[in-house]
Image (cartoon, rainbow, N blue to C red):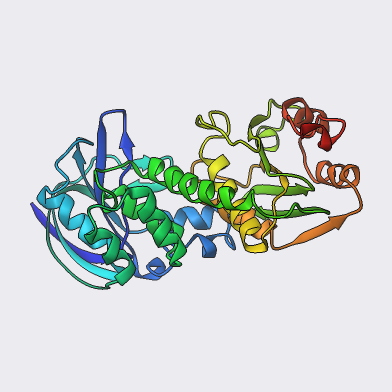
Amino acid sequence: MDIVNGFSPPYVYLPLIGSKKLLIGPSLVNPDVLNVYTDPKYWIRLTSRQVLYIRRSGKALFKPVDPQIDINESSVTKLREISLYSGNVEVELEYIKRRPNAIFDPYEGVTLNGGELGRIIHYTGGVADRRIEKVYEDKDLLAKDAVLYLHNSGLSVYKIQQLLSVGALGTKRKLVATRWSITAVDSIISSRLIDEIKNYPELNEHYLGESYVVGNRIIVMMFPGKFYYEMMESWGPYFGNRNPKVAMDYEGFLGRTNYAEEVEGAYYAARYSVAKYLKERMRQAKVVVLLEVDRNWIPNLGVWRVREGTELALKNLKKFEDENAMIDYAFSKTYTLRKSWLSSSFLLRQKSLESFF
């Protein structure tokens, strides 16, 4: 066995390997990227390759575990304790063997290249956060309520996702694959915000926002009316196809009860940013989000780029006189043809937006 020392942001994540195993362990990050390793708001200024460099920096040691492992098992407990901190944590680890080949987690864009984790010998540093301590110590607080409390207290959504993943929240605590904790947190928070939004006055003008983040063009259209949300995703420019099949998921005023099977996690990431924006402005609206992926994107670096790209688009809004002018402008900005978007859209195909209600 060998010993390795290093610093973690702290960052503990759990990729799902196959359908039966989780890998759990800390990332020991190179000093030159330590302060930006978990900062998507910084990544949006970069290229895909620069983000990939950050996410592949340092060592990642992991231990394969059953998802049903006792949450109080020694290594799980120490990893969870590390994740509670803010600021950098110095960690001393024992690893059993080096992996002959690096394993790439396609959802988070992290390379598992350090070897198999034996045990955590020692950790020090980091800053305790009373907000986190409060929900961690409360074993009677439902996970959903803990997520909402932390978000309302101003804790980063990315930190909340990690806390849910390592089993630090809720009454029935368990390990959750990082990809599922990300979607769960986006869904929980945006659902609560949408419930509040539905009581606000309707937007009475047409607005469009757009952004371009690491090879992803995001266009957000907001129409007057009661809350409605639709998201479409096109990989047309990535594959050089101007008339691709466009993925689409939507929900009406009454919401949805099933998972967004076509757009998947990106649907909830964008919905989070949309709901947050409308909540801050105390308005409800019909919202359509277009996501178009081109060849500047390196696939599978995570849905953070949708969350951050949508938020950025909503900071740069243009006002339009009517819906047709706004829709025409939106389609003029995309490589994907208008007919491809319209063939998948539920909202934009309607002759009159008022026909819904």
Residue at 87 percent across and 31 percent down: it is 351
Residue 19: x percent and y percent? 31, 28
**The one of 142 and 209 positioned closer to us in this rendering:** 142
Residue 145 horizontal side relative to residue 338, left or right: left
**Residue 303, percent from left and from top:** 51, 46
- How many numbered discs sit on the rendered protein? 0
Residue 47 shows in the view? yes
Q: Residue at x 90, y 46 (%)?
A: 325
Residue 354, above or below 221: above
Vertical relation: 95 (above or below) 238: below
Q: Is 295 or 305 nearer to us in this picture?
A: 305
Q: Is residue 310 left or right of residue 162?
A: right
Q: In the figure, is residue 27 to the left or right of 228?
A: left
Residue 56 visible within the image: no
User: Residue 170, position in %: x, y?
Assistant: 28, 49
Q: Which residue is farthest left?
A: 1
Quadrant where the C terminus is found in the figure = top right
The part of the image, by quadrant, that contains residue 126 is bottom left
100 and 204: which is toward the camera = 204
Residue 160 locus on image (x, y percent): 38, 56
- Where is residue 212, by image quadrant? bottom right
